Amino acid sequence: MNKNLFIKEIISNFQDNNLLINEQKSKIFYEFYEYIINENKKYNLTTIVEPIDVIKKHFLDSILPLVEVSNKIKNFNYNNYENIIDFGCGAGFPLMPYLIYLSDQRSKLNFDYIFVDSSKKKIAFITEFISNNKFLNNFDILCVQSRLENLHNKNFKHENTLVLGRAITKFNQLIKYILEFIKLNAISKLSFIYLTGPNFIKPSRALLKNCFGSKYEISFDSYNYEYANKTIKRGVFYLEIKRITPN
Ligand SMILES: C[S@@+](CC[C@H](N)C(=O)[O-])C[C@H]1O[C@@H](n2cnc3c(N)ncnc32)[C@H](O)[C@@H]1O
């Protein structure tokens, strides 16, 4: 698909799903798409490569839940957080499409945005895209190669952390990684937005209580949704963890 057609597709797909888009942003999405496809020939980044699939299953799939979460989850407000971390980001999903989407909104510049993955190649891929794209200079972005459970960085602002995740590993494993991360970085409040398939089995309160123990208060919520003319079904699981006793 040539650039003009891709841009037409992206504009119409975004508009069909009530997302704001203009020509300038759609060009950045095209550059990201082109970069993914070229790098994917050298090493494995993603199996989703058809242009329409990249638009729907990578770009919309990343942006829609992050835009909608404030309306769907009671009391959720981006302004309550200091940093946003994409856990196991792979080629940058879901955070990179969200940053491109926000690139014309100056109110979104107050966060530290952090990409984390254990893969050196994927972190190098994201780092290079950021350094070649001027619009991303407006954001404070850190790219960290690390296993999630070992992730420690003295530069993190620790109070209110928002973690994003999609397709990382089994959920039971993931919450153990999150607990390790909280302990290692002395985080007092962490929220986790987990993008799921429609058949995701929601964890019971007992399972979560058992994992986090008595030092932490947990609350959670979830919702399912459809997009692309109801052809794609997805879900969001939202988990909030607050430390109630000192470390
Ligand atoms: C299937 S990919 C998904 C990538 C991206 N989140 C997406 O939705 O396209 C899973 C990614 O999680 C990373 N990952 C899995 N376990 C990890 C761990 N313990 N620490 C760091 N990264 C991990 C892998 O390296 C891989 O890039």
Image: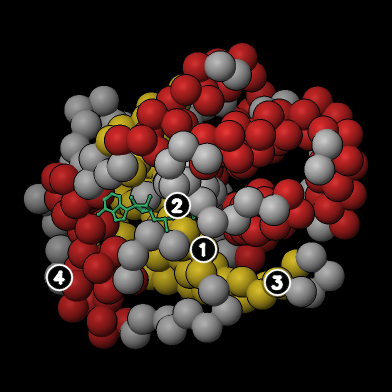
Percent from the top left, x then y, of residue 58?
A: 62, 53
Q: Nearer the viewer, mark 3 or mark 1?
A: 3
Q: Which residue is mark 4?
A: 214
Q: Which residue was labeled with disc 1?
A: 195
C-alpha gap between disc 2 and disc 4: 24 Å
**Which residue is nearer to you in this view: 62 or 205?**
62
Badge 2, how many Cα within 10 Å: few under 14, some, many 20+? many
Three-letter amino acid code at disc 3? Answer: Ile
Q: In terms of secondary structure, where does tag 4 sit?
A: loop
Judged by depth in the image, the label closer to the viewer, 1 or 4, is: 1
Residue with the mark numbered 2: 164
Amino acid type, callout 1: Leu
Residue 207 occupies quadrant: bottom left
169 w.r.t. 23: above or below: below
Residue density around tag 1, few if under 14, some if 14–19, many if 20 or more, within 10 Å:
many
List x then y, in percent, for residue 23.
86, 30
Q: Residue at x 82, y 33 (%)?
A: 3
Callout 4: 10 Å neighbours few (<14), some, many (20+)?
few
Q: Residue at x 61, y 71 (%)?
A: 234
Name the one closer to the observer, 102 or 34. 34
Question: As drawn, is 183 to the left or to the right of 29?
Answer: left
Ligand 1 lies under 8 Å from the Cβ of mark 1: yes
Q: Is residue 161 above or below residue 17?
A: above
